[in-house]
Image: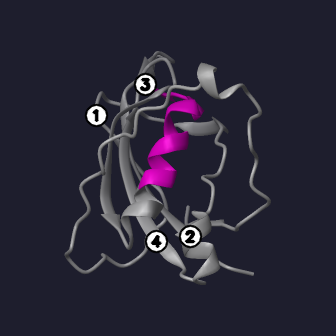
Amino acid sequence: MATAPEAVRPGPPTVAQAPAAEIMIAAPPEPPVSTAPPAPLRPPEAVASDGAVTQAVALKKRPPAYPAELARQEIPGRVVLVFVVGQSGRPENVRIEYASHPLFAKAVLAVVPEWRFEPARDAGGRAVRTQMRMPLTFLLD
């Protein structure tokens, strides 16, 4: 079943209000970014790793925020994400296969831990781990 890549559009930024003394944020390391040309866009793929007969289905998948700096510069982007949907439905072993800009990769990696899936199932109905490959496209209106 072919589906188009997901589009992410910029929206109004949200700002949490808290006293400065209570905020402690450590900057994460920059994700590795491939410099190889991107592979052609393909729909999300599920590759069963434990004998699955059904695919994992997204239940909760908040889109990543469009990086403000890139939106101001009107730069569109693309990220290809690879991860495993575990038996619990949580993403595991998340990695960026391709990103057109490190800020797009960072935005995607910030939301993936929140995503939840109905895991793939084997013939007996038991949840099994499944590898997913998901292209995301950042577009401007």
Give the mark nearer the N terminus: 1 vs 4: 1
Any mark on residue 34, and which?
A: none
Nearest the camera: 17 or 92?
Answer: 17
Nearest the camera: 5 or 97?
Answer: 97
Residue 97 location in percent, x, y?
A: 29, 58
Give the mark nearer the N terminus: 2 vs 1: 1
Amino acid type at image mark 4: Arg
Identify the residue position indicated by label 2 in the image.
69
Residues in magenta? 106-122
Amino acid type at image mark 2: Glu
Give the mark nearer the N terminus: 3 vs 4: 4
Give the mark nearer the N terminus: 3 vs 2: 2
Q: Using the numbered discs, state the Cα–Cα distance from disc 3 to disc 4 in whole angstroms.
A: 32 Å
Disc 4, SS:
strand
Amino acid type at image mark 1: Ser
Please identify the residue farthest to the front as the structure is shown. Answer: 21
Mark 4 surroundings: few (<14), some (14-19) or many (≥20) residues within 10 A: many
**Do we see residue 55 in this rendering?**
no
Identify the residue position indicated by label 3 in the image.
122
Q: Is residue 113 left or right of residue 28?
A: right
Q: Using the numbered discs, state the Cα–Cα distance from disc 2 to disc 4 in whole angstroms.
A: 15 Å
- Which of the two marks, 3 or 4, is nearer to us in this view? 4
Identify the residue position indicated by label 1 in the image.
49
Does residue 112 sit above or below 117 in this rendering?
A: below
Q: Are marks 1 and 3 in contact (CB under 8 Å)?
A: no
Nearest the camera: 138 or 45?
Answer: 138
